[in-house]
Amino acid sequence: MTFTALVLNQQDKRTLATVEQLDDSALPQGDVTVNVDYSSLNYKDGLAITGRGRIIREFPMVPGIDFVGRVEQSSDARYQVGDSVVLTGWGVGENHWGGMAQKARVNADWLVPLVAGLTPQQSMMIGTAGLTAMLCVQTLIDAGIQPDRGEVVVTGASGGVGSVAVCLLSQLGYQVAAVTGRLEQNGPMLTQLGANRIIDRSEFEQDARPLEKQMWAGAVDTVGSKVLAKVLSQMDYNGAVAACGLAGGFDLPTTVMPFILRNVSLRGVDSVQCPYAQRMHAWQRLAELLPASYFETACREVSLDEAAACADAITQGQITGRVLIKL
């Protein structure tokens, strides 16, 4: 039996991505073999496929940090042949072959059942990015940031995490300010997703003063670096920031002032090793909250042959919303 996969190899310190036919015997060890229906393109996938980030250390590697499919074979009682399952995180697509292939073999602990209310296609329109966005929104809720507290700002709003976060917050009744670097191109989409106003990213890229005018009750930050520093300096008293990304850099040029004078909290959000119960709750909330208009507005589908070109584009900030990869 053979299957098609996007395979990454390294040659002269360059990462090469090719679509290949592989034998089933090439699959890594694992409890469950899955016939993959869809994967999706995330920023981390873009870094891995282009070699612009040190995501992958052992080659060959099949990228794709998430996938949805049907169980073909299982040695774990929790999953039976034909079950629809979803995988996000756990180092898949980084140090274990991932979802950009027609087949995957993984540890059963990494899987969750496809929740009721979502089609396989919709689950990957959400994917790792959407799951992370839901965890960020839940983090703000857990911090006591309710809609009546004031405006919530989302940085990197046109990206995968940001676009889902804008939609979720709007559905929950929050006033959302969406920050993007391409107002003319992304503004209409963000407005459709529920943003109340759109702000040019350039306003957040200047060096932040220790404290600036209080503007935000809460924030979802996908950028890091100067942008996150600016957001922190503008938080309301008792405000909370959910930080989950570093598209702008992993440094944080800030001071302790927002934390000790305005009681601001900075909460990190990780979806890679998120526990099972928390994952399932997040997936169920995503199925309940995301409207049909999200899937129509912020998603597009490509083939595996197009994945490498899209990976280059996402690392250049040229991808809007979510990219679905049909296997």
Image (cartoon, rainbow, N blue to C red):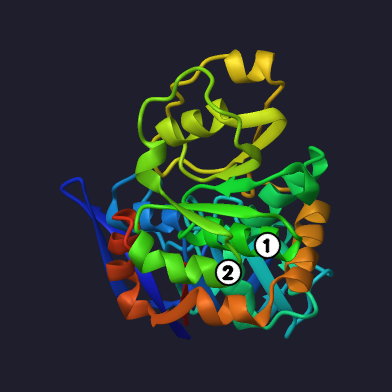
Instruction: Determine contact: label 2, label 1, CB under 8 Å.
Output: yes
Instruction: Relative to 266, say whether 245 is above or below.
Output: below
Work out whether 114 lies above or below 220.
Answer: below
Say which amino acid is labelled 1. Answer: Ser
Residue 85's x, y, as percent? 70, 73
Determine whether, in the image, residue 141 is placed left or right of residue 216: right
User: Which residue is depicted at the point 45% across and 71% down?
Assistant: 188
Q: Does 275 appear above or below 6?
A: above
What whole-number distance in Å separates the C-alpha atoms at marks 2 and 1? 8 Å
Amino acid, disc 2: Leu
Q: Tag 1: Cα neighbours inside 10 Å, few (<14), some, or many (≥20)?
A: many
Left or right: residue 242 versus residue 10 is right
Residue 201 seen in this snapshot: yes
Residue farthest to the front, as pictured: 213
Q: Nearer the viewer, residue 93 or 96?
A: 93
The residue that label 2 is drawn on is: 193
Where is 37 relative to 217, above or below? Answer: below
Q: Secondary structure at mark 2?
A: helix
Q: Residue 128 lies in what quarter of the image?
A: bottom right
User: Residue at 54% across / 20% down in the picture?
Assistant: 211
Residue behind mark 1? 170
